Image (tube, grey):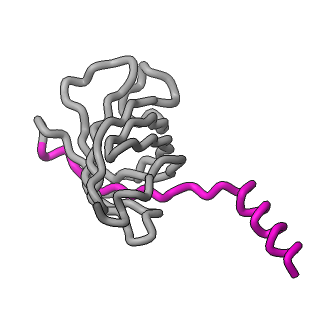
Amino acid sequence: MGTDDRISISGHWTGRYEYGLGAEPVPFEAVIAEAAGQLLGDITEPNTFHRDMGAELTATLMGQRTGHDVYFRKTYDGFDQGDDPVYEGQLNSAMTRILGRWRFPKSPALSGRFMMVRAVDISSRKETAVEAEALH
C-alpha cells in the first residue's frame, strides 16, 4: 500500500463541471466519506437542466479511489434520467485537487471536464494561527 492510500479524501470539496461549447461551468459542493478506498458522499449544485426540480439539485456520489485515481458515479435525487454521469480524475500530489473528465456512459457526446478542490476549514486555520502566535 502506497502512502497515498493511507491519506483519506474525506471532507468538504468545492468544484465545477463544464459542458464545453461555451456553456457556463456549473459549480457544486461535495461532502465525501472515504473508507478503504470506497467513496460515498453527497453533491449539491444549482439546477441548470431539470427546471421542475427547484433551484438546487442534490445527488449521491458512489465510487472508489486507488492511489491518485478517483472514480465515482453521480446519481441525482428525485428523478431517474436513465444514465448517471461518471467522473474519472486524478488527485494532485498534495491530495487537495482533483482534475478529470465526466461523461454519460450511454451518451458519450455528453461529456466535459471537472475540477474539485478540498475546502479549507477556516476555523482550524484560525486556531493554527493562534497556536503558532502563542509559541512566539
Give the residue at x 39% y 22%: 77
Give the residue at x 50% y 41%: 31
- Compared across the picture, whether 123 is left or right of 61 comes to right
- Compared across the picture, whether 56 is left or right of 21 comes to right
Quick check: 62 above or below 117?
A: above
- Compared across the picture, whether 93 is left or right of 54 comes to left
- Compared across the picture, whether 21 is left or right of 126 comes to left
Expressed as whole percent of the image width and height from the top left, the position of residue 90 reads: 30, 62
Front residue (pair 81, 74): 74
Q: Which segment did they paint magenta?
A: 108-136
Expressed as whole percent of the image width and height from the top left, the position of residue 38 reads: 32, 41
Specify the quadrant that holds the N terminus. bottom left
Quick check: 64 above or below 128?
A: above
Give the residue at x 75% y 54%: 123
- Is residue 112 on the magenta stretch? yes
Quadrant of the image occupied by residue 52: top left
Expressed as whole percent of the image width and height from the top left, the position of residue 110 reads: 19, 44
Q: Residue furthest front?
A: 1
For the question of whether residue 126 can be seen, the reply is yes
Specify the quadrant that holds the C terminus. bottom right
For the question of whether residue 20 can be seen, the reply is no
